[in-house]
Structure formats: structure tokens, C-alpha cells
Image: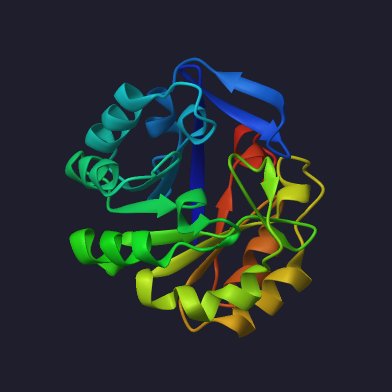
Amino acid sequence: MIIACIDLQGGQAVQLVRGRRRALAVNDVLGLLDRFREYPLLHVIDLDAALRCGGNARLVRLLCCQSKSRVHVGGGIRTVARAERILRWGAEKVIVGSAAFRGGKIHQAFLRRLARRVGRRRIILALDAEEGRIVVRGWRQQLSLRPEDVMPQLEPYCSEFLCTCVENEGTMRGTNLAWFRALRRATRLPVTAAGGIRSRREVRALARLGMNAAVGMALYRDQLR
């Protein structure tokens, strides 16, 4: 399944290259709901909240309320209260990344609290990696941990994983299928792949692994062939 991505920054839907350089921006964010109506699931990520430089809560809430597709929301979810609030807006699941780690290790106390309050079935853990190692804080800080090593320990706290190949994100050069094969072997839970996916061939290859494909740049540029 293809999941359409709506990344929010400064009140716009944007696409970034490797999480740094802005490659495009869309002012009519709500108009994307019609553009992406064929996709049954949307990922909405508040990049400003992730980077602790503001937020796009109003837009996130509107997207949750107005979308006819299911919506998963991430970006800056660091507290149980924020996760609960987003779920009340109508999100099906929340995507938690940086808050799952503290001091370079799994933040088990927070994850236990979160799972107890909202239920693990409504939690997705984002394990974004650059050169194989997990990155947090808006992909600005790299940990020594590798996703495939921590997945078994994280399984009790979530219903699935979202894994982004950061070095390929937004490049339109294709993704790292070998990496996703290794991740598939590391966990029994569903995995959604992201980062540079540009072709239906890649989407099919991921589907054969039992993975969904979160696609951004290729959809915005209408180049998913």
C-alpha cells in the first residue's frame, strides 16, 4: 500500500531533501486531501514541532477532521498528553520518534506510560536512520543504535514501525531495499518504509516484503511510475 505524506512547516506542506533543504512547498495544504484521495492512509508530520520551532497544530487538526482517509500523525509528540490530544482530533495512530529515546537509550518509562494510556495498537514508533544509525531531534542527532538491534525491545510498546532511510529522503534516487530487507528480518511487527521511494517497482518490492511504502516527493512531482 502507498501512504501519502504531508509534512508541515511554516503553515505549508513541504518536501525536504534529507530533512534539510526545502525542495518544494504547497500553500493549499487542505487541497492535498482531494489530491491524495485515492490513498487510504495519510502520514501527517509536523516538522516545526519536531524541531521545537513552533508547530502547525491547527492544520494537523483540520487534516485529521476533514480527511476521508485514515490519518497517522507524528512530529514533536513528546508527552502522553499531546498524544492523547492528537488522537482526540481523529488521528488513527500517533507516530513517536525522538521521545522513544533518552540519553542514547530506549526511554522505556515513557513508552510504558504512553502504551498504558493510549494503547500500543495506536502507537507507531519511528526508527529513522542515516548510514544505518538512528537519528532523532529532527534528524539532527545521531545515536549509536541501529533499528534492527532495538526493534525486538520496542515491540511491546507499539503496533508497527515507520523506518526512513534518511540519506535517500527527497532525493528521487530510489530507496535502499537491502536495508529494508534486513529490517523485515528483525521484527514480527508491520513496517512502513520511507525515504527516496520513486517507482512502482520499489513499491511492489516492498509489498513483497510485507511493507507499506510512505511516499512524498514522487507524489508531489507526479513522478511515481
Give the vertical position of 139 relative to 32 (above or below): below
Position of residue 69 measured from the top left corner of the image (x, y, whole percent): 32, 46
Position of residue 120 measured from the top left corner of the image (x, y, whole percent): 29, 68
Which residue lies most toward the front here? Answer: 103
**In the image: residue 223, left or right of residue 63:** right
**In the image: residue 199, left or right of residue 213:** right
Position of residue 188 measured from the top left corner of the image (x, y, whole percent): 49, 84
Q: Residue sitting at 67 percent across and 66 percent down?
A: 145
**In the image: residue 33, left or right of residue 51:** left
In front: 156, or 19? Answer: 156
Position of residue 174 measured from the top left corner of the image (x, y, whole percent): 78, 53
Q: Residue sitting at 43 percent across and 68 percent down?
A: 160
Quarter location, residue 19: top right
Give the vertical position of 137 relative to 123 (above or below): above
| Numbered label tally | 0
Q: Residue sitting at 22 percent across and 66 percent down?
A: 116
In front: 97, or 195? Answer: 97
Q: Residue sitting at 50 percent across and 17 percent down?
A: 10
In front: 105, or 11? Answer: 105
* Residue 32 visible, this angle: yes
Give the vertical position of 177 relative to 31 (above or below): below
* Residue 40 visible, this angle: no
Q: How is the image coloured?
A: rainbow
